Image (cartoon, grey):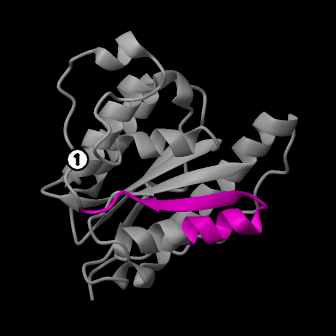
Amino acid sequence: MKVLLVNGSPREKGNTFTALSEIAKQLEKNGIESEIFWIGNKPVRGCIACGKCREKGGNRCVFDDDVTNRVSEKMENSDALIFGSPVYYGQPAAQLMAVQQRMLYSAGPLYKNKPAAVVCVCRRGGASAAFQTLQMPFQMCNMPIVTSQYWNIAYGRDAGESAKDVEGLQTMRTLANNMSVMLKMYATGKADMPKYEDWSPMNFIR
């Protein structure tokens, strides 16, 4: 079993990567393989509603000059998907939204029934709105949503600063545990329920 984690930040090793890495480490502890795929910082075109992908079939967008089809190619050998994004103006990174819309429209059957989750990282606010924005398309595409102990949000500004968000990282580990259980249930029909950590609440008034 394998989970594809898509890093939608233009910064390859920033706070989004830190959050996704925590998930990847916990998945490994549960015997689940994972890959963190960075979409890069080159331009990603938006969908122009040409409909050519539906005419041609093949689970590919007809525009193959950016990273969108690479995500769908990797999903052919992946059992679940997690999107990670920084928050800009209360919204996910624009390039990640463009990838999501084009990949789901052009290759929807490839994603159907595969568990999905979203992770958002922000300095202070807007993460819950960005989280909802990225999660809604997965729900439209029959992708079971994996939950955690809270919304999958971590906080940090400078690169790596989200590692100081104790509760945020715990939320990532809980997400990984829940994802592992769902995948094992799908694969074998049975799985041990996760052993949850004692809650580590954290606020930001210092």
- Please, is residue 108 above or below residue 155 in the view? above
Left or right: 167 in relation to 194: left
- Please, is residue 109 above or below residue 189 in the view? above
On the image, which quarter does residue 8 sit in?
bottom left
On the image, which quarter does residue 31 sit in?
bottom right
Q: Residue furthest bottom?
A: 206
Looking at the picture, how far across and down is residue 116, in whole percent? 53, 41
Between 101 and 190, the residue placed more toward the observer is: 101
Between 59 and 183, the residue placed more toward the observer is: 59
Looking at the picture, how far across and down is residue 129, in whole percent? 25, 47
Looking at the picture, how far across and down is residue 14, in whole percent? 34, 76
Residue at 20 percent across and 49 percent down: it is 94
Residue type (three-letter) at the residue carrying disc 1: Val
Left or right: 12 in relation to 139: left
Count of all numbered marks drawn on residues in the image:
1
Residue at 35 percent across and 84 percent down: it is 161
